[in-house]
Image (cartoon, rainbow, N blue to C red):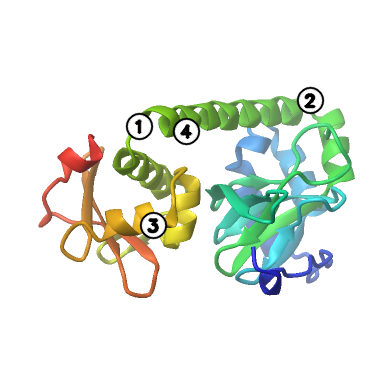
Amino acid sequence: MAAGRVTAVQQCSAGPLTTASNIAGRIDLISSSPLFADLQLQAIEKIARLARPKTIARDELLLMQGQPIRLVALIRTGSMKISQLAPNGNEVILWIYGTGSVIGTLTDPISCCYSSSARALEQSTALVWDFAVIQALMLEYPQVRKNAGQILAQRLDELEERFREVATEKVARRVALALLRLLKLVGKKVSEGVEVSLSREELAQMTGTTLFTISRLLSSGTNWDMFFLGGKQLLCATFKCSSRLKMMTSRIYRLFREACGI
């Protein structure tokens, strides 16, 4: 990662005075989060009051690899990419998370520092808790600890599946599968259907290939229109000149089965 892009991590401010409407909005988000599933309303209200709102500017770091563990965040709007820096300084994107996802350490840490960084891909908002508060909540509500374990298990299963794909699948199919996952996690409804935005380099890092290979794949067709089948929807991913990738539903495009193998 270029040094000029590193943004200092800011401490979470207390935010505006908590009102009944603010608490109600927090309760809705927290109730739908897997981390706080199966809790009583009284517990949800307490957790909501302990949260602090935070706005994260585009390209700002919420968590930084190597810094002491201080907080856990629940994404309210926007999306965050989780990445690690290799010893040679190269950045590797582990995954991207959107609304409702939990960012940060969810169990007793092996070390006192974050093992990865979380950077906003767009202006985002989140509810944040001090890590000590989350640890106390896990003691008070064992269900929270159980939920955290389930989240980690699901992420490990997905990581194993993606590793298998890197080892056994062709690039075109890996790209298709990655985009279909991202559609569910960070897809945004637009007039044409559903949209996911990321750069060529980000897509290459998440699919275990090179920027050159992705660029060649994207330019292999007319304006690089690539098609996948997801459920009953026909998904079209079109690479724009602005170096952002957009994915949308459409009835007028054909399936690109041979390249994607889906």
Residues 94 and 144: in front is 94
Vertical side of 243 occupied by 100: above or below: above
Q: Are marks 4 and 2 in contact (CB under 8 Å)?
A: no
Task: Give the SS element for disc 1.
Answer: loop
Vertical side of 231 occupied by 4: above or below: below
The percent coordinates of residue 61 (x first, y second) are: 70, 63
What amino acid type should be assigned to the residue bearing mark 2? Pro
User: Mark 4 against mark 1, which lies toward the viewer?
Assistant: 1
Task: Give the SS element for disc 2.
Answer: helix
What amino acid type should be assigned to the residue bearing mark 1? Glu
Determine if residue 231 is in view. yes
Residue 26 lies in what quarter of the image? bottom right
Vertical side of 210 occupied by 261: above or below: above
Residue 212 numbered mark, or none: 3
The percent coordinates of residue 97 (x first, y second) are: 55, 49
Task: Give the SS element for disc 3.
Answer: helix
Q: Measuring 80% from the left and 29% from the top, which residue is drawn there? A: 141
Seen as rendered, the residue at the extreme front is: 88
Among the two numbered marks 3 and 1 on one chain, the one whose residue lies closer to the N terminus = 1
Q: Which residue is mark 4?
A: 162
Left or right: where 194 falls relative to 229: right
Q: Measuring 56% from the left and 64% from the top, which residue is drawn there? A: 121
Q: Which residue is mark 1?
A: 169
Q: Are marks 3 and 1 in contact (CB under 8 Å)?
A: no
From mark 4 to mark 1, how far is it between C-alphas?
10 Å
The percent coordinates of residue 151 (x first, y second) are: 62, 31
User: Mark 3 against mark 4, which lies toward the viewer?
Assistant: 3
Residue 142 numbered mark, or none: 2
User: Mark 3 against mark 2, which lies toward the viewer?
Assistant: 3
What amino acid type should be assigned to the residue bearing mark 3? Phe
